[in-house]
Image (tube, grey):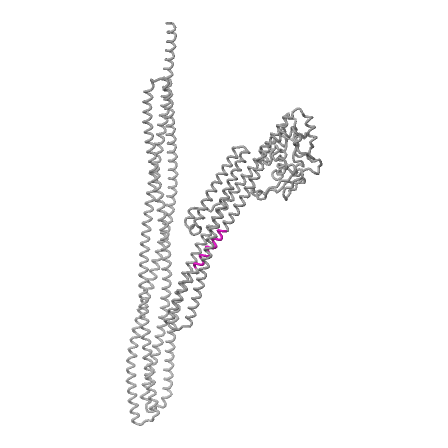
Amino acid sequence: MSFCGSPGLLSTGTSRALPPSLLKLRQLLEDKLLILQETVSADRQVCEESDAVGDIRKHLDQSQELRRHLAELQSNTEQEISTITQQLGCVVLRRERISCELADLQRQHSEVQSALERNRDSDTCATLLQQRRELQVCIAGRAAQRERVCFREQALRALQGILSADAHRYQQETQKLHLLSHRASSVMPGESQNEPDNMECHFDSSKQPESPSSEEEAPSAKASQNPKYQLYMSGEALGNGSRDPEGLVGESGPRTSRWESSRQGTSNRGSMESLLSRDWDTMSDRVGGFESPPLRVFNSPYTSSLDFNPIHRMSEYKVQDGLSPATDFNIFGLNGRSTSPVTFTNVHAPRARYTSTYDTLTRRRERETAPNQVSLRSGMSNKRDYIEELTKQLEEVQRRNQFLEAESIEMDKERNQIRFEMRGLLVNNEDLVRNNTQLQGEMKKMRDRMVEVESDHNVMVERFRQMEGELKEAREVMVEANTQEYAFNFLQQSLKNKIQDAEDALDKQTQHAQVISEKLWLAERKLEELEVDKETRGKKNSELNSSVQRLEDELAEALQTSTQASVELSLQQKLRADAQLRVEELEESLLEKNQEMLRLQQIIHRLQGEVSGKLIDKEQSLEEEIQLRERIQLQCKQAERHVEDLQMEIHTAKQAREDLVKQLKSTQERIIDLESDLEEMHDSEQRWASKHKRVLEQTEQLQLRLIQEKDLSDQLECEKAIFERQVKDLRLEVEDLQISKVQEDVVSKAESKVKELENTLRAEERSKTVLANTANKLERRINELTDQLEEEHRIATEQRDLMTQRLRSMKRQLNDVEEEASRKEAQQRHTQRELTEERETSQRLQRQLLDQHLQLKRKESLMMKQTLGNLRLDLSVDEEDGPAGSTAI
């Protein structure tokens, strides 16, 4: 039950998702799981190789060790839960603090908004707008922080729930192991009492408890198992209880009778009857071949039965794999030719009641011929039953261990899946926060632009209204002039032409004003189009920047992988150098041993003529040489193992090279994508160039229109001068009329007409100045747009240059990676050649050692033969000297 997943997968996001204490806990859990697996495998081997009683003892020790490991895991998980609760407290405090700050910022924002609505001063409005923007930025940052803290709190709470569930599961597993060990230990003490009790029960009838006297008191022993263990033992659901005589399964717990309770109170827990009662109790759940078990729980070995059924043999009981045959019939029933006095009892034959003690004693008196055989053989069957029950309990424990292993694997899978989901949620949350901030910034920019456009539109609308008012006034003046034509009797002909000229001039001015208004509308439309194009350019530039950043990240990852591969290669080179040094040391040691062998050979030649007493020293020296040779052989074996380790390292290097090749392919695909992006950028640049040309053409057209408007303004100035001359002439004529004593009404009307004409001239001057101002503004706007277009073109060219440079650098890096891969391949080939050479040298050294060993054996045999011959000669000489001396005497 560990937190581990793929190490490569945990390396990227575990520092954000999990604390370092959890990583330590994961390592500890992995170690404990390995220990558990080793103990389970050792348990299986021991169960296969050793006998049942020793297996149960070992399994009890292992279950104690498992309980200890589970206790350690539970303590570690509780510590982690305490640390996580502390972190949760810190996170909750931080969330509350951030929420308080956010509430204060929102309150300040509302106050600033109300102040903006109240104030009308431009300076204070500007400062308040700046404060509002700053507060909006702060509020967005605090909201993003609060979201991150809330997500972390949710993750910590989920992790706390997982750890608490694990702790609860560990506690349950410890309880189950405790129950299992208690059950096994309750069976163990009967081993020491099994054979003595069964041996004494045949010779001393007083040690057997009294059997029930009536049929109603016959025990119906029922055994129940824990429902949890029933689920764990196999895929099928087992019954919880024994069968009734009618074949029904009891669903309640065990119901022990008075007879069975009185028997359990004695010290015969490991006796034959108790074991057989357990077998009969549990046989209804395990054996599918028996429809109705017998009413008798224990069949006494002294009861005689003439019903021998050859169906119930050892092979058929073993095929059913449910119950030991020793619990159902006598061991002498296995062979039909057995001369045992104890006959076989039929399993299916119903027994009405227990046999009394008197019956058993009388039968014993009738069969006094071979009581010892009966007792011994019944003791053997009892021992076999006990061993088989112990093996069954061992199988249950093994199944339980297998279930625990499967459950730990499933927990690992679920935990890894939860961790991956949490990492994905964290990444998605960060992406959403980033996108939210970007969208908020873009919304602010769009609002500012909309405010500016609305202000320009309001100004233009006001100007258009002013022009319309002026036109209405001019038309009213024209209507009044037409009504007063009939009053001008004397001045009709002289004033008609002047009024017509003034009307024509006014019509021209109105037409010119309409043309200017249309031009202004077109200029506004063009400005809007330019702003839209600018926004699209900004978006595309941001997309290009994001793609460039992504490419830079991918390049950094490729560089990291290349550095890791280089580090692995350096480690391989170091290992190869160490292997070479070890081989050289071995060769030097072999040379030294050869020199020692030569020296020893010289010593052996020098000592051949010495006495047999020195042969013992020589044999000791030879034994030391043999030990040295064995050490050398061990060193050779170690060198071979080291060579095998180097082969494994070469295999890992091959795998790393294959990974590098895969990375190269992925980088090549990325380069192809970048080239396609570059082509798209070139196409977009061409489109921008065409748009730039169109804008330049439009600006040239606007400049031509401005020149035309300047010409029109010059014409208007000439017309103004003409009007001024006409006004002067009219004044002179009015003065002449006054001199000629024309009616005062006509003069006053003429004067009013002159004043109105002067007012119209002044209004035309004002409109001309307004048009000039608008033309200057348009010129400035056009210049600004041209500057912006030039800057955008320059930025686009710079970005294109940067992309080309990055592509070149990526190509160089790819070439470097390919060169490194080729270099690694060459180094790998070189190491393989060196390994083959080392193998050949090791084989050659082994052959030399074998040759030297054979030569030494030959020399030893020759030396022994020589020494034996010398001893024989000495003995023969002594024998000849002995009779010669006796004859001489």
Q: Classify 243 as above or below 145.
A: above
Front residue of 148/879: it is: 879
> Residue 398: horizontal and vertical position, in percent?
53, 39
Instruction: Give the extent of the magenta segment.
Output: 144-160
Q: Quadrant of residue 686?
A: bottom left
Q: How many marks?
A: 0
Is 795 colored magenta in this rendering? no
Q: Classify 134 as above or below 308.
A: below
Task: Tell which residue pokes out farthest to the bottom in this image.
Answer: 741
Front residue of 670/50: it is: 50
Front residue of 444/492: it is: 444
- Does residue 42 appear left or right of residue 240 in this picture? left
Task: Tell which residue pokes out farthest to the front in this image.
Answer: 889
Q: Quadrant of residue 258?
A: top right
Q: Classify 17 as above or below 740.
A: above
> Residue 772: horizontal and vertical position, in percent?
31, 75
Q: Classify 637 as above or below 422.
A: above
Location of the C terminus by quadrant is top left
> Residue 375: horizontal and vertical position, in percent?
63, 28
Is 151 colored magenta in this rendering? yes
At a point 35% along the width and 25% down the height, the residue shown is 852
